[in-house]
Image (cartoon, rainbow, N blue to C red):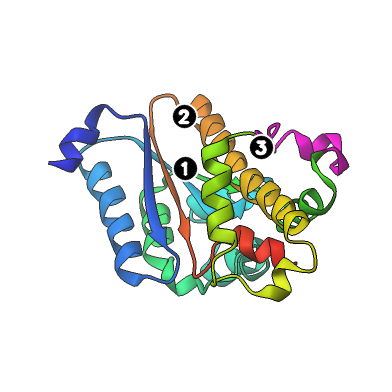
Amino acid sequence: EMLADLSGVKFIYIGETHTSFPMHRLQARIIQSLVERGCPVSVGVEMLPVTIQEKLTRWQLGILAEEEFLREARWYINWSYNFGYYRPIFKLIKDYHLPLYGLNVPREWITRLRMKGRDSLSEEQKKYIPPLDLTNKEHRLLIRTMFESSGFSHMMKGQSLDKAFERYYRAQVAWDMTMAYNAWQVLQKEEIRRQCSLAGRGLGGEAQTEAAR
């Protein structure tokens, strides 16, 4: 019934917990089912940055073996989770030659933005990160509540809680808005396809990692 409901939908977000094998198998199952129903599909992934698109296209076309892909895409630099969690999805992408897109930007860009703001980025880097909306009161309250929870270490928060939160919040908004922006860009390129975006959460979230850095 869900797949039937998706027949007319252009953008499909399939969430995950990064370390959950069942969730990744379900993601692969949804994508494969859409393909088998004759729905053209492209896949956008949180795990990799938009700046390595040429490597992603080479994987999609079957040019790269797995070891080559992991090395050239700098998987364990761009992403900290074992590739084994994602292997069924990436195998599916290669088997069906599905267009594959990175939705993120290099982590060092987010780190710089967190510490010094978006204006510290080069003009080239700003092309990939939209202007940030830091004014949503409900969203700020949600993220502040998470930030002040016991799940975040005192070392991460530092001496000034407010200052640490502003940096953390800036990184979180940049992380999320960048992926949304790049997913929208994919939709413009792949007008006839359904754009499946894969993103979710780890044990504490990616921006938490950036805040720690």
Inspect the image, locate mark 2, and give the three-letter code of the amino acid beneath it: Glu
Q: Are marks 3 and 2 in contact (CB under 8 Å)?
A: no
Helix, strand or loop for disc 1: loop
Q: Which residue is mark 2?
A: 190
Sooner in the amino-acid sequence: mark 1 or mark 3? 1
Q: Is residue 123 magenta?
A: yes
- Real-space Cα separation, disc 2 to disc 1, in angstroms: 9 Å
Highlighted magenta segment, given as a residue range: 119-133
Helix, strand or loop for disc 2: loop
Inspect the image, locate mark 1, and give the three-letter code of the amino acid beneath it: Pro
Q: Nearer the viewer, mark 1 or mark 3?
A: 3
Q: Nearer the viewer, mark 3 or mark 2?
A: 3
Compared across the picture, whether 144 is left or right of 1 comes to right
- Is residue 47 visible from the viewing direction of this image? no
Dominant secondary structure of the residues highlighted in magenta in the image: loop
Q: Which residue is mark 3?
A: 134
